Image (cartoon, rainbow, N blue to C red):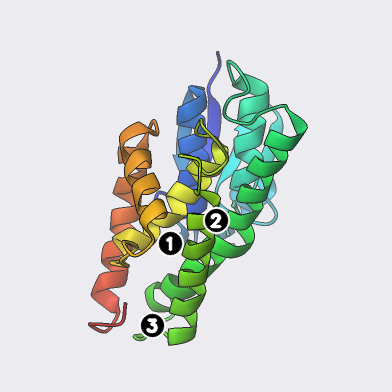
């Protein structure tokens, strides 16, 4: 199997989510690091590949794709040995999709609303409203996990890869998720069972450490 190319930045949760999916699929990946902090994503060569200049971006031969969630489902459809990571059954697939859209529209967005202004814009505090938004998202995750060990059922799927990347960023920022029992138990399973989780954690820790250095003490 030829390697796919992933334009990747390890600090980025979406980028790590796509890489977790690739590791779960088992497709060989050639990683090309695009350092967002150095503005590499805005250079002409990368804009030619992805005019939206977001990380992650996948190149598979002449085929180019971005958005980590789209990349994850493509990798399973193109290279998965079976459909466990992204079921073909319409209802099971729809549940995975719902969790993926939850990550795009709610979970990652709310985590980012906390770290981005601190890490990139020099803010020192985190509002109660932003923490409330994250608490609400974690509460919904606990409900998704009621009666099932993984977000979409009895097997882990690409929805777990995406949400694990977002949650690992949150945890490494020093956010205490322990009052959300099911999400906490799920996160422990992710650590133990998701292929490539340690690699994911390395990037999350770097971003988390930058956040912790920059934010005022006691903010989260
Ligand atoms: N929904 C997208 C989000 C991608 C995204 O916003 N990536 C950020 C890094 S976390 C990025 O590339 N930012 C640079 C930019 O938008 O110019 C995905 O899941 O891939």
- The mark lying in front, picked from 2 and 3, is 3
Establish if 65 lies above or below 87. Answer: below
> Which residue is rendered at x = 33% and y = 60% of the image?
171
Disc 2 crowd rating (10 Å Cα; few below 14, some 14-19, many 20+) is many
Q: Secondary structure at mark 2?
A: helix
- In the picture, the disc for residue 122 is 3
Q: Is residue 12 left or right of residue 102?
A: left
Q: Nearer the viewer, residue 207 or 94?
A: 94
Q: Position of residue 200 (x, y in %)?
A: 37, 44
Q: Position of residue 143 (x, y in %)?
A: 53, 56
Q: Is residue 36 left or right of residue 189?
A: right
Tag 1 residue:
38
Establish if 7 lies above or below 62. Answer: below
Tag 2 residue:
41
Q: Nearer the viewer, residue 176 or 149?
A: 149
Q: Position of residue 5 (x, y in %)?
A: 54, 32
Q: Secondary structure at mark 3?
A: loop
- From mark 1 to mark 3, how far is it between C-alphas? 17 Å
Residue farthest right in this picture: 90
Q: Are marks 2 and 3 in contact (CB under 8 Å)?
A: no
């Amino acid at each position: 199997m030829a390697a796919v190319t992933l334009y990747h930045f390890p600090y980025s949760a979406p980028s790590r989510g796509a890489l977790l999916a690739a590791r779960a699929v088992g497709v060989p990946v050639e990683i090309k690091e695009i350092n967002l902090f150095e503005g590499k994503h805005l250079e002409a060569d990368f804009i030619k590949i992805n005019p939206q200049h977001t990380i992650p971006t996948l190149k598979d031969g002449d085929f180019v794709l971005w958005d980590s969630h789209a990349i994850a489902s493509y990798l399973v459809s193109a290279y998965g040995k079976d459909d466990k990571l992204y079921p073909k059954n319409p209802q099971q697939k729809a549940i995975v999709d719902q969790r993926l859209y939850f990550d795009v529209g709610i979970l990652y967005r709310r985590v980012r609303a906390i770290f981005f202004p601190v890490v990139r814009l020099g803010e020192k505090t985190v509002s109660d409203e932003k923490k409330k938004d994250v608490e609400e998202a974690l509460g919904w995750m606990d409900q998704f996990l009621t009666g099932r060990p993984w977000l979409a059922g009895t097997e882990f799927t690409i929805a777990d890869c995406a949400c694990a990347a977002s949650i690992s960023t949150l945890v490494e920022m020093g956010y205490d998720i322990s009052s959300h029992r099911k999400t906490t138990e799920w996160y422990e399973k992710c650590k133990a069972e998701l292929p490539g989780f340690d690699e994911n954690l390395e990037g999350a820790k770097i971003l988390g450490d930058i956040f912790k250095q920059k934010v005022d003490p006691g903010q989260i």
